[in-house]
Image: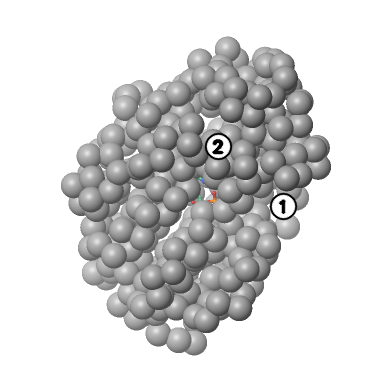
Amino acid sequence: MRTVVTGGGGFLGSHLCEALLRRGDEVWCLDDFSTGDPRNVEHLRRTPGFRLLRADVSRTCDLPVRVDAVAHLASPASPPDYHGMPLRTLHAGSLGTENALRLALRDGARFVLASTSEVYGDPAVHPQREDYWGNVNPVGPRSVYDEAKRYAEALSAAYRRTHGADVGIVRIFNTYGPRMRPADGRVVSTFVCRALAGEPLTLYGDGSQTRSFCYVDDLVRGLVAMLDSGSPGPVNLGNPAEYTVADLARLVLALSRSPSPVVHGPLPVDDPCRRRPVITRAHDELGWAPRVTLEEGLRRTLAWFAPAPRAQAAAAVPRAPVET
Ligand SMILES: NC(=O)c1ccc[n+]([C@@H]2O[C@H](COP(=O)([O-])OP(=O)(O)OC[C@H]3O[C@@H](n4cnc5c(N)ncnc54)[C@H](O)[C@@H]3O)[C@@H](O)[C@H]2O)c1
């Protein structure tokens, strides 16, 4: 198998590249490192079968070799990233997805789109099944990400209907683990880094909003199962155990034995109140279910961040990237 991973230099993509190499795939990692980090794949550079190409998939995704599968993960994904790069985010979802689809169609390859639970917006239905169409503000600040992914789903489905492309869509719910960037503005990495540094943990509003947190190894197993299946999806991939953000803060503080105080800040615009996937379809079509508990996953994540907590926590105050 020759598998292309767009966004393979990012958090999820680098773990996916590793998993695919472990089972013997040849992996072509395409990344422009706009939000990823070359260090995520540095250890793979000498692995036989691994190729790294620096490329903006919104411009081109053409490869000089025949490919068997394309996993399309390239997109800014965390709120500070997509707020800071609104147009690039829209382009990754639209132009980038179409370029990746064309590559897959050219070679009759399997194509998997990494979509997101954000397509459900601030959901009026709870928990979220794949047949729920969502509640998204099309002009709010988050829309550059949510609507880009909704468009990417529509485009992928149209390629399947129009050209018979072998397309599968996964909707990923909050995933965490080693290689998250400390400053990526996502709740788990922020809480972990600040707890390790003894800095305050900020709850937006009263912290009663819920999220479902999936450990990265579980998520990657689901992505590989989707690549290997013929399922068109969409399929939710996430851990249905639901926690309030306040619960998460308490657990991080307990596991890290941190003296950090908890403080409160204003709720961001369009922040979803509740999130929990129904994963019956993933179970039935992919034989998939998460295995790692939040407590165990947080232990592993804390262990990964622990060696340089202060430097990382100092960086954990998100800085908005600049659109280019
Ligand atoms: N991590 C999560 O919880 C989560 C949840 C839902 C969906 N997703 C989706 O999974 C994918 C990976 O997310 P992640 O958490 O690993 O984020 P990430 O920012 O770590 O990884 C994204 C990667 O894509 C690259 N990239 C961005 N635009 C590109 C472009 N135009 N051309 C080439 N490369 C480009 C970045 O440099 C980065 O390496 C994204 O599509 C994201 O929307 C992630």
Frontmost of labels 2 and 1 is 2
Which sits in the foreground, 24 or 170?
A: 24
Could you tell me which residue is drawn at 58 percent across and 41 percent down?
Answer: 301
Residue 246 in the image: x percent, y percent? Answer: 55, 18
Residue 70 in the image: x percent, y percent? Answer: 41, 69
Res. 82 visible in picture: no
In the picture of the structure, the residue carrying the numbered disc 1 is 323
Quadrant, the C terminus: bottom right
Could you tell me which residue is drawn at 44 percent across and 69 percent down?
Answer: 22
Residue 85 in the image: x percent, y percent? Answer: 66, 49
Could you tell me which residue is drawn at 23 percent across and 45 percent down?
Answer: 283
281 lies left or right of 75: left
Outermost residue toward the top in this view: 206
Q: Is residue 240 above or below residue 113?
A: above
Quadrant of the rendered image containing residue 119: top left
Which sits in the foreground, 191 or 53?
A: 191
Could you tell me which residue is drawn at 40 percent across and 85 percent down?
Answer: 66
